[in-house]
Image (spheres, grey):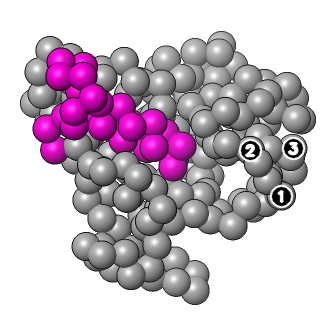
Amino acid sequence: MFGNFGVTDNAGLIRLMRDADVSPVHGHTHRNRSVDTEKVIPALWESEPCCEAKGTKPETLANCPDCQEEPFDHSATCYSCGVCMHCGAEPPTTDFGARHLCCFKMMHNGHEWRTQWMVRVKTDTPGSKVTGHDGNEDIHLIEIWLDFDLGLFDEVTWPVREEEIRRGADMTPEEQEAMLDGTLREKMR
């Protein structure tokens, strides 16, 4: 019933929270154990951007300005060439932005998934817990439970293994072959 799942960034998390705010059965009422999205969004931790992306909404990214690849998983960096999706600059190698690990998921019913998320939020956010230290600041996390539409999860998340590779982990020979074949994303799911 429970299992480890994937990673998303703030844009993906916001889409999941907004979906959880609307019940497919009862119209515009909250799903069970959903969150008040408009209260959580201002509390989300955000890393320093590598460009002046003024007026750019994270959920409506254009094609990569470097290689013209279409946006993947609403990530801030291009999956193909690794540059910033806003300006085409090489992003800092040590800063991966406000990404969140989905601790586990549980099938809730026929049309919703229930997931537990540990979300990095701004310092002194009510209900947050300090769980570590990142450079010059403490890491503050809050726990969020979300119920959302089944199809949305795959759109806005990527596997934990893919995140490890993005952070510099070596690929296995099988993963390298899958990357060359263009099947790495499917293999990781």
Viewed as shown, does residue 34 lie left or right of 90? left
- The residue range painted magenta reads 4-33
- Asked whether 31 or 117 is in front, the reply is 31
Q: Earlier in the sequence, mark 2 or mark 3?
A: 2
Q: Nearer the viewer, residue 165 or 50?
A: 50
Identify which amino acid the numbered label 3 is placed on.
Gly
Residue 14 in picture, x, y percent from top left: 45, 43
Q: Residue at x 36, y 18 (%)?
A: 151
Percent of width and height locating residue 43: 44, 65
Image quarter of residue 94: bottom right
- Residue 123: percent from left, percent from top: 44, 79
Q: Residues within 10 Å of mark 3 (few under 14, many from 20)?
A: some
Q: Is residue 189 magenta?
A: no
Q: CA distance from mark 3 to mark 1?
A: 11 Å
State whether residue 131 appears in this view.
no
Give the quadrant of the C terminus.
Answer: top left
The residue labelled by disc 2 is: 56
Amino acid tagged 2: Thr
Residue beneath disc 3: 88
Disc 1 residue type (three-letter): Glu
Residue 50 lies left or right of residue 73; in this view the side is right
Q: Residues within 10 Å of mark 1 (few under 14, many from 20)?
A: few
Q: Is residue 145 above or below residue 110?
A: below
Which residue is disc 1 drawn over?
A: 52
Quarter in which the N terminus is drawn:
top left
